[in-house]
Image (cartoon, rainbow, N blue to C red):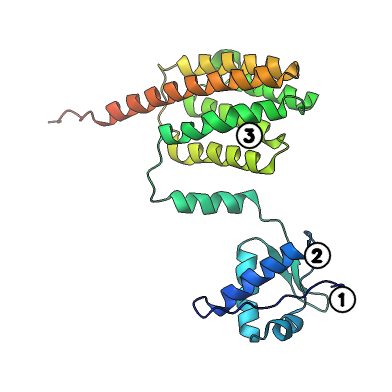
Amino acid sequence: MPPTQPKPSLTRDKRVKRSDQVVDNIKRWVVQTQQQVGNKLPQEKELIEQLGVSRGTVREALAALQVQGLVAISTGPNGGATLTQASYEQCLQAVSNFLYFQPVDIAMLYALRRVVEPELAANVATRLSEDDLAALQALIGHSHPAHGGSADWNERREADLLFHDRLAEACSSPFLALVCRLLNDVIRRVIIVRNALTEFDQFDEEIVDSHTELLDALRARDPVRAREVMRVHMEHAEALALEAEARVDRGSLLMKKPTG
């Protein structure tokens, strides 16, 4: 660590566990000194001296940072804690845990999708490569049985979500992309009904029509048109998702006839 940089120091608060204080202060130091992924934290002995805490407290703090995905810890002469980028999967798991006992429904999710997905479409309209456009075209086909898609309703809905994932991957805004990907995965985990709706082909038609129109706008590099197409698509998709859920809910209420 260059000598001109400030060193980690401990802001003491008796209400907060000591190792948690160390975690917070290391994070603050990382931001203040503009550390980058791949940089090493001070060695354990140095942290003990600078923070005025025990070896056990430092190790507990580093273990917590490792669980959060912010450091990787290695052993040996050149070992120590190296700054890492928390993965999307860790973020998704944290959000999923938060929502585990929360009421999450289609209307709630689409209230957000109606806001962020049109902005996502506008953002990527001038950023997609020819490979991106080709991949999106293929996913449109995978979302409809008449165009090569699976006979399984849920697999076709997965192709739909992958189309939106692909847009998020091209987004220039990390936060917008993250929100869109999280919404897609919450839909995968919470909303997609694991029942085949064989007589509900409106979803297939909506996906093909809207995604094809959106792809035309993306090929034209037209963010205004892309935003509007996505806005209308989200409204239609929400209505169909609500209808699909209602159909399954009604079916689940049917009682089997007694036998014998």
Circle 2 packing at 10 Å, graded few (<14), some (14-19), many (20+), is: some
Circle 3 packing at 10 Å, graded few (<14), some (14-19), many (20+), is: many
Which SS class for mark 1?
loop
**Quadrant of the drawing holding the N terminus:** bottom right
Circles 3 and 2 in contact, beta carbons < 8 Å: no
Q: Nearer the viewer, residue 248 or 165?
A: 165
The image position of residue 135, as x and y in percent, is 71, 25
The image position of residue 237, as x and y in percent, is 49, 22
The image position of residue 28, as x and y in percent, is 68, 66
Among the two numbered marks 1 and 3 on one chain, the one whose residue lies closer to the N terminus: 1
Residue indicated by mark 2:
39
Mark 3–mark 2 distance (CA, rounded to whole Å): 30 Å
Residue indicated by mark 3:
165
- Residue type at mark 2 is Asn
Q: Quadrant of residue 107?
A: top left
Of the two numbered discs 1 and 2 in the rendering, the one whose residue sits closer to the viewer: 1
Specify whether 136 is left or right of 103.
right
Which SS class for mark 2?
loop
Residue drawn at x 57%, y 73% is 20
Q: Quadrant of residue 233?
A: top right
Q: Is residue 129 above or below residue 184?
A: above
- The reply to whether residue 94 is visible in this rendering is yes
The image position of residue 90, as x and y in percent, is 59, 54
Q: Nearer the viewer, residue 242 or 117?
A: 117
Residue indicated by mark 1:
3
Q: Is residue 164 above or below residue 232?
A: below
Residue drawn at x 44%, y 49% is 99
